Amino acid sequence: MASEHAALLKESVTDFATRATDVARARALRGTVQEYDRSLWRQMAELGWLGVTLPERYGGMALGVTEAAIVAEGLARVLAPEPFTASIVLAGGVLAASGNEALKDELLPRVVAGEQVPALAWQETAGALDAGHIMARATPFEGGFRLNGTKRYVAGAAGADVYVVAARSDAGVVLACVEGSAAGVSVELERLADGRNFGTLTLNDALVPHERVAASGEAAAAALGRALDHATAVASAELYGVMSRALEMSVDYMKTRVQFGRPIGSFQALQHRAVDLYIQQQLASAALQDGLRELDQEPVAARRSSIASRIKARCSEAGLRIAREAIQIHGAIGFTDAYDAGLYLKRALVLAAWLGNATQHRRRYAALAFKGE
Amino acid sequence: MTVHESGDYNALPDDEFRSQVRSFFQVRYPEDLRFLLRRVRMSEVRGWWNTLHEKGWIAPNWPREWGGMGLDAGKMVIFLEEIERHGIARAADQGITQVGPILMKYGTQAQKDHYLPRTRSGEIIWCQGYSEPNAGSDLANLQTSAIIEGEHFVVNGQKIWTSFAHEATHIYLLVRTDKDAKKQKGISFLLVDLNTPGITIRPIRNIAGHEEFCEVFFDDVHVPREALVGQLNDGWSVAKALLGFERLNIGSPRRPQYALMRLEMLARANGWFDDTGFLDRFTAIKLDLEDLASLYSRYIEQVKRGEPLGQDVSSLKIWAMEAWQRLTDMLVEAGAEDGVIEGAHDVAGVEIDFLSPFYYARPATIYGGSSEIQRNILSKYVLELPS
């Protein structure tokens, strides 16, 4: 049954990626303030994708991380800038796992419909992989919390309608929803290599009533940990989409580009280089498939993080390597802004760094595997 | 219902079959032959061969009519996994893995009747006569000739890198039977008794100090015409039929487990996991092997579904062998001066042999089609790059 869903979804994503969007659209949207296309976002909602992992009571499809990864990979192949992983898997995932039912009833159906786009403002320090580093304060006052601090590297911030902010209170992590326009909240954007943005949220005595607190304490930490691991896995699937397309472009180019009177793909030095990239792609594919399957069985937190780290380490490394070598295989044309290979490299750069790069994830994997005993 | 009564292993649930195989191996396999860091000699495992033969398990891949276990692909994978898991040495089993399946597909009734029972019992031990001094990676360039004279082939030439020829009774040979045909077209497949006059076997010592492979010389060796398997000049297709499964088998992620376990034990004993430099390198290799396991299990699933393996399985062999080498390189380096002392010794309370795994892994990127040849295969058949 699960694989049947997966096959149908894959077909629908492939169809969408060829019919509704292309790399030229991604190119045109880079560096713009809106970052992505709201009308396309609503088309994705109509296809049900914005609720792919969310419960049916909110209009979602209640499928697994595997299916979310299918959507993300398909969009990534054509560099679609819609913030599916950041807003649906990460921010939506945190909201769905939180305990404030009234807030979920209000927000999630609108998220699934594409009317409200959330972003998660959890991180403060570059390279952080979990909530342990959070310093932003949530101070209780009559009726809610007063938030102070700076949240950085907020993916999907440019087009977000609501931010889920993680801050620390004496009772642990608090996850609270704030609007960008609220008093005491300011949002600034930082341009990324791929033409998208990270947001920086400055919270200066921003007041949040209890009704807008999604979760706190243990429940908040658990919701955050799970959503981060799932988003890490889905971002890895995006990297897989990027590397697959970059490899296809390179191999196609090797078949058609003629030098010394022969296609350059006939030269063994380049052939073996391409084969090594293919092997990396195969490893990424196999690790991803195994990892996603296990994540959907809801393993305990430590195991879940270990799987997410294994996948992200491989996909980040393989994705960057394949995208870098795509430039080399294409030669000078690959280094031009007009050619698409550069767009794939830049997307790989951002995806590899976001939610933890290969080195950071290998270290977390090691900490879970070797340090615990 | 026990297996003994029905004889149909495929009817057993997987878990039940696995536990039967596992407990048999645990009880009957000699403890001192587990996880050997070199290829095992036939003389060492003759007893184990007999044990398997008596049990009816010596030929898991053969159909039951020929005394095999008749395992389907799924059960076969379980059987092999348990072999690897217990660290069982693969005895000179090319007769079981190669000659048997080849004869069943291409052999005459007389060949099957004569060779299959004797191969199973271990009365006949086979070695593989493919490589020659000028036909290594370019195997189709082989020059050992077989000329028909009356009722015989007369074989002249030289084979090399023939593993355990000095312990075998028979050799299966690729020979040139048509000098004028295009490379692959003029090759035939012969079965030859090593006691035939005119054959000289000379062992070659390898860098690990072991005599595992040999040179085999053929000087006017008269081989009966019935020794031909398949059609004359069609030996290349006969030999090629089994290559995919070999690359899958070689790609098993369990092979590097001795080196990995020892390195991990050493690291714990010495506190190396607190050293970020070590930790980063070790974890990278550990994950290389984890991801290998995922890739391997994907091919295993394919085999279980009854689908043929494509040429893409070469990527498994390349990655498995190269990751294994990286691991054994790191083991030697981690040992520092201890790492270059021969034999097993005690380091920080861990009994360890640094050099044997290192040597053992060296030829892995050469035999069974070198890593470079595997890359050529992937380039041509999978990426479809021009030649």
Image: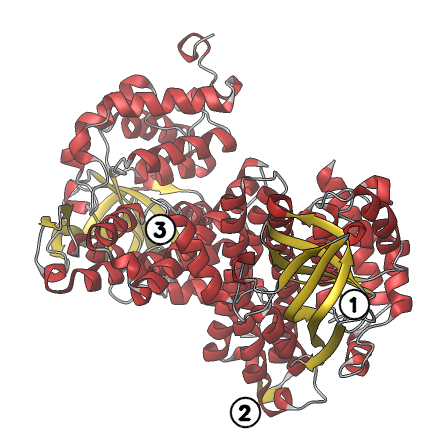
C-alpha separation, residue under disc 3 versus residue under disc 2:
55 Å
The residue beneath circle 1 is A82
Residue contact between numbered discs 1 and 3, judged by CB atoms under 8 Å: no
Residue contact between numbered discs 3 and 2, judged by CB atoms under 8 Å: no
Amino acid type, callout 1: Glu
Secondary structure at numbered mark 3: helix
In which image quadrant can residue B85 be found?
top left
Q: Can residue B158 be seen in this view?
A: no
The residue beneath circle 2 is A260
Disc 2 and disc 1 on one polypeptide chain: yes
Amino acid type, callout 3: Lys
The residue beneath circle 3 is A371
C-alpha separation, residue under disc 1 versus residue under disc 3:
39 Å
- Write down the chain letter for disc 1: A
Location of residue A160 in the rendering, given as x and y in whole percent from the top left corner: 80, 67
Location of residue A12 in the rendering, given as x and y in whole percent from the top left corner: 82, 54
**Up/down of B377 relative to A253, above or below:** above
The crowding category of the residue bearing disc 3, from other C-alpha atoms within 10 Å (few below 14, some 14 to 19, many at least 20), is: few
Amino acid type, callout 2: Phe
Out of B5 and A103, give the one closest to the viewer.
A103
- Write down the chain letter for disc 2: A
- Write down the chain letter for disc 3: A
Secondary structure at numbered mark 1: loop
